[in-house]
Image (cartoon, rainbow, N blue to C red):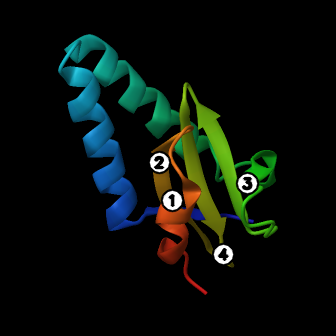
Amino acid sequence: MDYKIVWSPEAIEDLQSIAEYIQRDSEFYARAVVIKILDVSRSIKDFPLIGRIVPELENESIRERFVYSYRLVYQIKTQRILIVAVIHGKRLFENIRERFEE
């Protein structure tokens, strides 16, 4: 099945915040992290089930891939994959529950 990758506005904000935070110390590493996250997000459409089921939600359609210390959280829909969040692995998941479409 051909999926379209779509980023939620919140996930885009997450990525921008990550880049800004890392950029304080190194523009090079900020760029490298963002590129890696984008590469992983693009690869999801080929194998969407490769990500693990998010343990906090236990929902087959909500999965995540790890990129460095970040969780790239996405929801598999019929024709698309929605990137819902990019959060640090130590951040509480409760803060992003409301981002998921029902």
Q: Which one is in front in this view, the residue at disc 4 or the one at disc 2?
A: 2
Q: CA distance from mark 4 to mark 2?
A: 18 Å
Tell whether 35 sits left or right of 13: right
Residue 83 numbered tag = 1
Q: Are marks 3 and 1 in contact (CB under 8 Å)?
A: no
Measuring from the top left, give residue 101's x and y in whole percent: 55, 82
Q: From the image, tell me which residue sits under label 4.
A: 77
For marks 3 and 4 on the same chain, the one whose residue lies earlier in the sequence: 3
- Mark with earlier residue (2, 3): 3
Which label lies toward us, 1 or 2? 2
Q: Secondary structure at mark 1?
A: strand
Disc 2: which residue: 86
Q: Residue at x 35, y 50 (%)?
A: 14
Whether the residues at callouts 1 and 2 have beta carbons within 8 Å, the answer is: yes
Q: Residue at x 39, y 57 (%)?
A: 11
In the rendered image, residue 53, in percent from the top left (x then y), is placed at 79, 56
Query: Label 1 sits on what residue type?
Result: Ile
Label 3 sits on what residue type? Pro
Name the residue that disc number 3 marks.
48
- Residue at the spot x=32%, y=65% of the render? 9
